[in-house]
Image (tube, rainbow, N blue to C red):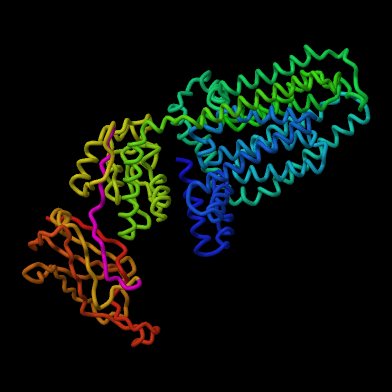
Amino acid sequence: MDQTSYLIGSYRLQEEILNYGFGALWKEISEPVATGIALSIDGALSGLLLGGTRLPQLFVNFLAFIAFQLVIFQTARIVWKHYSYGYLAVGLVLCQNTLWYFVGGLFDFRIDFFAYCFYGIWACCIIRSDLFHSRRGSMIVALVAAILVLHRYFIIVYMFGVLFGLFAILLTSRLFFDRTHLARKRLLRRSINLCASFAVTGLIVAPSIWISRHSIYGYYVVGHIIGKEKDIRAAVSGTTELLSSLLFYPKSVIFDHWGVSFLLCAALALLGGLLGRLFCKPSQPLSAGPTPPSPRDETFFLQILFLLGAIVGPLIVLTTDVAKSNVVGGVVGGPAALLLVALSHRLAPWRQAPQSNRLARISIATSAVALVLGIGHMFLRASHHEREYADRQTIEQIVTLERWMTKYADERGWTVPKVSFDVISDWLNAGTLAVEGYEKERVLLRFSPMLGGSIFSTDKKEALRLLADSDFFLSTTLPQPPYPFDNDVVTYQPELKRWADENMVAEPVGVSGEYTVTTYARPTALLAGISAGWITSSGMTIDAKRTTLERFPMIRLAGTSGYVPQLPRVPTISATINTASGDVLVPASLRRVNAAGYEILVDTSAVALPQSDQIIIHLVFDAFFVPKALGMNADTRELVVLAPTSVRLGKRDP
């Protein structure tokens, strides 16, 4: 469901830019967002540049992944001084499952994959800056961190924890490393640059976080700390016990995001270093060159400690959250690959035999095998269908249903159609309806969830109230997930369907197979003859199905602010239905509602309807006003009232 919110945000912003220009970007930046502001902007700009839908948005993920591979290659090549380590790092990344994970992977447009890539880039930049020894490199770290935080606000918590730990190590490092003046100067420089880098990041992201502070509080503090939702999520993920909660993320990272290929590649990386140490003894002649670093040189240990912190830190933060998710743990994949490269380099005796041909050949062979393993893993995953493919026929039916609902709502002018569900589902929800509608029909509607829009408990009375206020209702035979809503709806699901059968229209689209989806729509009609938002003296027509009118003969048209004082009197309506034997009069009336509203009632209950599938009712009004004649403006039309904002069909009151 998260993907749909980011896609809808991108599509909405894309349309606003097309309609109102790039000033819409400033409005977007100033709007509060709970999770991060930048991904929807990326998707909208990519959509404007490339055209089309979904693929341009996924191109953002693709670019982030390409950037990650380039950066980790250059980092490993330069920091560990041999191009083979660059290929080893890329091979380790390609072997990870995160790229292919069914949620939060390359083909899922949400903040998780972007965070995975840029958290890895952030770690690379810190390693490349020699652990903040380079001031220029530290500023690059700050900019990368700002980009990452603007895409995912919460990741600043990971960064703060990791950098705070590194800062504490720098302050106490004189106890472990060289105590020379030069060593102390290096550590002081690193400490100052680290603080400056984090401060610059904070200055860049602070305005956006401040604007979104209330949304962030509601999403993270209420949703994950003090609210009830966290306990529901924990029950669903099976982590209510302490041990299961502690082991959830380590298991998720190892099995969901790293996988067998990565573990084999990791073993290969370490084995390559060990083979280098075994077959390239320090007794080999040393070549002329710079003096090897002191055995107590702090750089390697700081690299290892930082990378361990970049892996363990986020997992600690995530584990403290009662609500667990398999998606988020993959963020540590980049630091894990860098850690393995650093260990492999340390195991190999490069400092004792810096130009050993045998050592170079072992390193190149190890990296080549790792890269081939990574590419093979990519091809293997790309060449077989994911688990959703088994349900492709059902998915095609769902897509057809969603397209039909979009066209149905658009034809009736429902810009915010209200939809109810009797199940919490990833496939059937308001977000997927809006996304499919825009992608398939190029119509951007804001489907508003009513019943089934929340996982919380809903009693029968409230469920029926929400259903009565809905434009659509999808009644299913899907298995009920273990949410409080689903546990409640099982007890009164037959009554929901019974109410829909009596008060709504069952439409000829749905899903059949292992489970069924029956589609109900609020009884309504199509209007024609509206002139630029007004009903004129020439009248209008109401088009409805005969079968619908037979069940729901009362037509109610309402305008919430449509009655205007310029009318000389309340108009009388002449309503007729054209039949083979001539026009048949239909009882109709218009009355004022409150100060500026109106309601038109058309009663077809006593009329013998023609046998045609569609019934056309013509409405003519005998009172109007002309704006030009009244000196209001140059409009010469004979206007009656503004067009109705609500069209409802119902049963005649007893």
Task: Indicate the position of residue 370 as horizontal and vertical percent values.
Answer: 65, 24
Task: Indicate the position of residue 131 as horizontal and vertical percent values.
Answer: 78, 33
Q: Quadrant of the N terminus?
A: top left
Instruction: Examine the rendered structure and indicate whether residue 525 appears above or below residue 326.
Output: below
Q: Quadrant of the C terminus?
A: bottom left
Q: Residue 272 falls in which quadrant of the image?
A: top right
Q: Is residue 551 left or right of residue 91?
A: left
Instruction: Examine the rendered structure and indicate whether residue 415 appears above or below residue 424.
Output: below
What residue lies at 71% left-to-right and 22% top-to-bottom? Answer: 365
Q: Which residues are magenta?
A: 515-532
What residue lies at 48% left-to-right and 23% top-to-bottom? Answer: 239
Instruction: Examine the rendered structure and indicate whether residue 351 appears above or below residue 389.
Output: above
Q: Is residue 452 left or right of residue 36?
A: left
Q: Is residue 112 left or right of residue 143?
A: left
How many badges with numbers are in the image? 0
What residue lies at 79% left-to-right and 12% top-to-bottom? Answer: 279
Task: Indicate the position of residue 620 as horizontal and vertical percent values.
Answer: 20, 75
Which one is in front, 499 or 545? 545
Task: Indicate the position of residue 416 as horizontal and vertical percent values.
Answer: 37, 55
Q: Is residue 319 visible?
A: no
Residue 557 falls within the magenta-colored stretch: no
